[in-house]
Amino acid sequence: MSPATERLVLRWIHILFGLPLIGYVYGPPAEVQPYAPMFQYVFMPGLLLSGLWMWKGHLVRRLFSK
């Protein structure tokens, strides 16, 4: 996969996993409570991992290529 395609895919994953954050933060607490575990265990880790990979992925690749 080319670096440009990888960046594009990671960007869209990051955006799509970040959208539920808006609903979780700004939604009424009674309505977002049933979705809290899904947000905590699916969306937030995906958001964090995609952000970290975009930020420091080059160092991880360099570490494993040695």
Image (cartoon, rainbow, N blue to C red):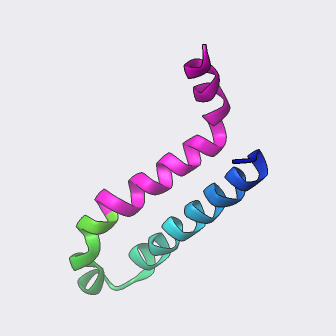
The residue at 31%/60% (across/down) is 40
Above or below — where is 36 with respect to 34? above
Q: Quadrant of residue 59?
A: top right
Residue 2 placed where, x, y %? Answer: 75, 47
The residue at 46%/70% (across/down) is 21
Q: Quadrant of residue 35?
A: bottom left
Q: Is residue 53 magenta?
A: yes
- Whether residue 58 sits left or right of residue 64 in the image: it is right
Residue 34 placed where, x, y %? Answer: 21, 78
Q: Is residue 28 magenta?
A: no
The magenta segment is: 40-66
- Whether residue 21 sits left or right of residue 51 in the image: it is left
Q: Nearer the viewer, residue 5 or 37?
A: 5
Residue 6 placed where, x, y %? Answer: 68, 51
Q: Quadrant of the C terminus?
A: top right
Number of dots carrying numbers: 0
Q: Nearer the viewer, residue 46 or 22?
A: 46
Q: Magenta: predominant secondary structure element?
A: helix
Above or below — where is 6 with respect to 30? above
Q: Nearer the viewer, residue 29 or 21?
A: 21
- As drawn, the residue found furthest toward the front would be 1
The residue at 63%/34% (across/down) is 56
Above or below — where is 51 with respect to 63? below
Q: Quadrant of residue 10?
A: bottom right
- Whether residue 44 sits left or right of residue 52 in the image: it is left
The residue at 49%/46% (across/down) is 49
- As drawn, the residue found furthest toward the right would be 4
